[in-house]
Amino acid sequence: MAEKRRVFKPECREGAVRIVTETGKSIPVFAQDLGINQTTLASWVSRVNRAGGGQAADEAEENARLRRENAQLKKDNKELAMERDVLKRCMVLWVK
């Protein structure tokens, strides 16, 4: 007689994938710990990587762009502060 298929809740799948990706633990070892077939766990992980892989790249690109923009704004802010200080000194000299 055929073995009955186990059904895993989405929360269980997400938790297992999260643990594998965050801890870096190998899929076969973790699958054995959980009592899940390693090909099942590997398919869950690959499905998440395919679906979210583009998102991770987009987020990394966005972070890099924001870091460059932040550095430029800091530089501009320093330049504006220097100009303000020069203008203050000029006003003091002009008033005298």
Image: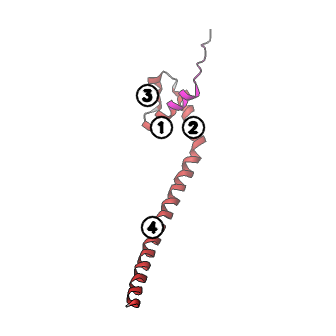
Sequence-wise, which precedes: disc 3 or disc 4? 3
Across and down, in percent, residue 62 comes to 54, 55
Q: Secondary structure at mark 4?
A: helix
Q: Secondary structure at mark 1?
A: helix
Q: Assess disc 4: are there few (<14), some (14-19) or many (≥20) residues with their C-alpha within 10 Å of its C-alpha.
A: few
Q: Label 4 belongs to which residue?
A: 74
**Quadrant placement of the N terminus:** top right
Q: What is the spatial separation of the Cα atoms under label 3 and label 4, in whole angstroms?
A: 48 Å
Q: What is the spatial separation of the Cα atoms under label 4 and label 1, in whole angstroms?
A: 35 Å
Q: Is residue 39 visible?
A: no
Is 42 part of what is drawn in magenta? no
The residue nearer to you, when weighing 80 against 36, is: 80
Q: Residue at x 45, y 67 (%)?
A: 74
- Stretch in magenta: 3-16
- Residue type, label 4: Lys
Q: What is the spatial separation of the Cα atoms under label 2 and label 1, in whole angstroms?
A: 10 Å
Q: Label 1 belongs to which residue?
A: 21
Q: Quadrant of residue 6?
A: top right
Q: Is residue 92 above or below residue 16?
A: below
Sequence-wise, which precedes: disc 3 or disc 1? 1
Q: Residue furthest front?
A: 95
Label disc, if present, on residue 29 of the rendered structure: 3
Q: Secondary structure at mark 2?
A: helix
- Residue type, label 1: Thr
Q: Residue at x 47, y 23 (%)?
A: 34
